[in-house]
Image (spheres, grey):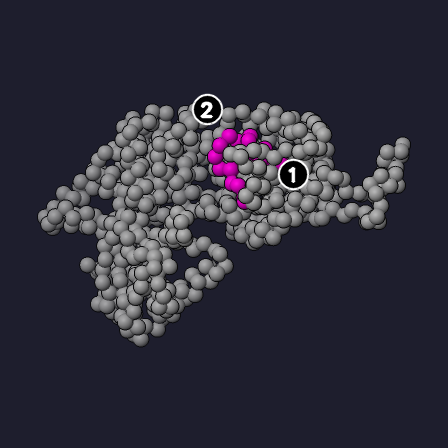
């Protein structure tokens, strides 16, 4: 079943060169197993006495912990190994492994592995390194690298959708990352006709076609399987072959057929996405929430088919080259995010996903709404400098500020009904749940409410109540949420922190009261504060205190960013909103400097 050419190609990927003798030995000492999409290879808790070499397809490892739903912990693709740890530890399987697409694996028992190790120490050394790498990543809490998605199944949810034009444009953008081949039902029928004489059964036909697809995978970075009808046999066949299923939808999409097809995808354990096509020069008119509720999909994208930058964004996602921008909280210093964003755009770095905490969630939202950077500057200046949204003071029973002005500001610029699902870019905001001491990631729901929760500094602004839970400023738990962006599998992450230089305050006597300090500084007694005196204000103290609890998490997140920006703002306070131009320029200049010193990241 496995040719020497296929085995040699596999070992070349594994060991970096052809191994003729080893290829022959593995072919003789292994058992080939075909797995249909969704079929199980082994169960968590089963005795582990063999490893598996993936010839083609993709396998997924799922971990069940108590009563919690199973969690995907690892994916392995073509010419990779799985189950090898059991050969060394002689322990039970730690996860359940199943095929996420039609796959062919070679099963190598422990006894046969020992024979292969004696014949080829290089092979044994490679497997040992894999074991050490996976155990090290597990101990450090790091995710395993995902195999590249190479087979994309594009499914039109109804016949009137412009799927052919979409396929053409997507293929054109994907060629930037390698060779692309598009295959449709006519190509499959032609293949079947050409091989009719040598095909004894429908099962053999499917097997031969899977092998042909495997051959194309060796020659192309991407294979696009084009499905024009969800009810065809071709559509069902493609589900078993794809790494990702792309469901094309538009304002006409609401049929039960596409919903049923999406459910079958979920049962097959293949990753699926909803691509919502919108009309040019409009804001999204199709509510993603409605379509997402009808379909079992992992994520979605809002796209204008005529807009090349939208198709390019999709292509970067599938090529693992998308760029995520993470913006930290930090009061007025958050204006630096706007300057950093402007410098990134000028450098030709596209932003595909955004997320942030507190003031970072505000700027991130404006970016996700696809607002021009110059307009973002106008919005931030008008909203936070010319109009002070933190000036509606109240008796401090719950908070010092009522928050009504801030609510009105967010509704004015973000819209009262704008939902996160309908933004052009993927977006999330982070808040802290005081009720159950957890981190809340807002990736759906009403946008302004998510921002309001993320920016609600305890004691200063009232908490946001959602489902009987008290939500406050995300800076308490994760002020620079790089880890959340990393979980979305973006290619590169740019993180902008706001702790560049700690502002120095004048030391004083711990026994000195606030009134004595004010008198000494002459602020309330007709004089002016001395330039050398910088006493911390109440708001400043509360804001700084809120960041301490997430400092350790921030340090971890900094290490996981591909580009880390930290504009120097040691002379600027967290509440110096009037220093708007200076802060924006600090973010802009610092980003330009960092990018100029870098080489080869993008």
Instruction: Check residue 282 in the rendering and tell me which mark sits there, or answer none.
Output: 2
Please name the residue shown 85% across and 35% down the image: 523
For label 1, the crowd category at 10 Å Cα-Cα, with few meaning under 14, some 14 to 19 and many 20 or more, is: some
Horizontal side, residue 382 vs residue 249: left or right: right
Report x, y in % for residue 324.
51, 43
Report x, y in % for residue 260.
28, 34
Q: In front of the other: label 1 or label 2?
A: 1
The residue to which callout 1 is attached is 458
Q: Quadrant of residue 273?
A: top left
Which element type, helix, strand or loop, lies under badge 2?
loop
Above/below status of 380 relative to 298? above
Horizontal side, residue 266 vs residue 422: left or right: left
Report x, y in % for residue 582.
70, 37
Sequence-first tag of 1 and 2: 2
Above/below status of 418 relative to 93? above
| Residue 12 makes an appearance in the image | no
Above/below status of 333 relative to 507? above
Report x, y in % for residue 369.
52, 31
The residue most toward the bottom is 118
Please name the residue shown 36% across and 56% down the image: 95
What range is drawn magenta here?
Answer: 438-456
Q: Closer to the camera, 103 or 451?
A: 451
Horizontal side, residue 546 vs residue 310: left or right: right
């Amino acid at each position: 079943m496995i040719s020497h050419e296929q085995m040699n190609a596999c070992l070349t990927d594994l060991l970096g060169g052809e191994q003729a003798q080893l290829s022959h030995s593995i072919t003789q000492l292994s058992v080939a197993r075909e797995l249909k999409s969704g079929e199980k290879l082994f169960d968590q808790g089963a005795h582990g006495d063999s490893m598996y070499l993936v010839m083609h397809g993709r396998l997924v490892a799922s971990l069940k912990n108590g009563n919690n739903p199973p969690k995907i912990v690892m994916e392995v693709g073509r010419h990779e190994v799985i189950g090898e740890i059991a050969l060394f530890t002689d322990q039970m399987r730690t996860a359940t492994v199943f095929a996420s697409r039609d796959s062919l694996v070679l099963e190598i028992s422990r006894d046969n592995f020992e024979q292969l190790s004696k014949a080829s120490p290089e092979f044994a050394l490679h497997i040992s390194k894999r074991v050490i790498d996976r155990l090290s990543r597990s101990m450090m809490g790091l995710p395993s690298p995902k195999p590249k998605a190479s087979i994309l199944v594009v499914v039109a949810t109804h016949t009137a959708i412009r799927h052919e034009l979409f396929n053409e444009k997507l293929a054109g953008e994907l060629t930037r990352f390698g060779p692309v081949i598009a295959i449709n039902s006519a190509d499959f029928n032609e293949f079947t006709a050409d091989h009719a004489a040598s095909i004894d059964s429908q099962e053999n036909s499917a097997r031969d076609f899977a092998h042909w697809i495997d051959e194309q995978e060796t020659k192309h970075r991407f294979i696009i399987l084009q499905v024009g009808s969800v009810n065809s046999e071709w559509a069902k066949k493609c589900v078993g072959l794809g790494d990702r299923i792309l469901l094309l939808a538009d304002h006409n999409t609401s049929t039960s057929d596409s919903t049923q097809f999406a459910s079958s995808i979920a049962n097959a354990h293949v990753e699926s996405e909803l691509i919502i096509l919108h009309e040019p020069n409009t804001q999204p008119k199709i509510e993603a929430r409605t379509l997402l509720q009808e379909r079992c999909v992992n994520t979605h994208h809002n796209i204008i088919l005529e807009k090349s930058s939208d198709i390019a964004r999709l292509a970067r996602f599938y090529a693992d080259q998308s760029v995520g921008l993470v913006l930290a909280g930090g009061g007025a210093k958050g204006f630096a995010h706007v300057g950093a964003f402007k410098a990134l755009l000028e450098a030709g770095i596209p932003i595909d996903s955004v997320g942030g905490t507190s003031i970072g969630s505000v700027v991130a939202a404006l970016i996700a709404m696809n607002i021009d950077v110059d307009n973002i500057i106008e919005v931030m200046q008008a909203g936070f400098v010319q109009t002070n949204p933190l000036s509606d003071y109240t008796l401090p029973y719950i908070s010092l500020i009522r928050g009504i002005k801030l609510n009105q500001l967010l509704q004015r610029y973000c819209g009262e009904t704008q939902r996160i699902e309908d933004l052009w870019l993927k977006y999330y905001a982070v808040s802290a749940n005081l009720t159950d001491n957890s981190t809340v990631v807002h990736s759906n729901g009403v946008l302004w409410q998510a921002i309001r929760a993320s920016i609600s500094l305890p004691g200063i602004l009232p908490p946001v109540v959602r489902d009987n839970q008290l939500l406050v400023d995300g800076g308490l738990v994760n002020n620079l949420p790089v880890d959340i962006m990393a979980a979305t599998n973006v290619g590169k992450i740019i993180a902008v922190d706001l702790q560049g230089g700690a502002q120095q305050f004048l030391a004083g006597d711990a026994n000195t009261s606030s009134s004595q300090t004010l008198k000494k500084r002459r602020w309330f007694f007709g004089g002016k504060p001395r330039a050398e005196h910088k006493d911390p204000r109440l708001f400043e103290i509360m804001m700084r205190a809120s960041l301490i609890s997430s400092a350790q998490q921030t340090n971890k997140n900094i290490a996981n960013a591909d580009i880390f920006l930290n504009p120097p703002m040691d002379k600027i306070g967290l509440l110096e909103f009037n220093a708007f131009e200076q802060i924006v320029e600090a973010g802009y200049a610092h980003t330009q400097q960092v990018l100029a010193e870098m080489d080869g990241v993008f």
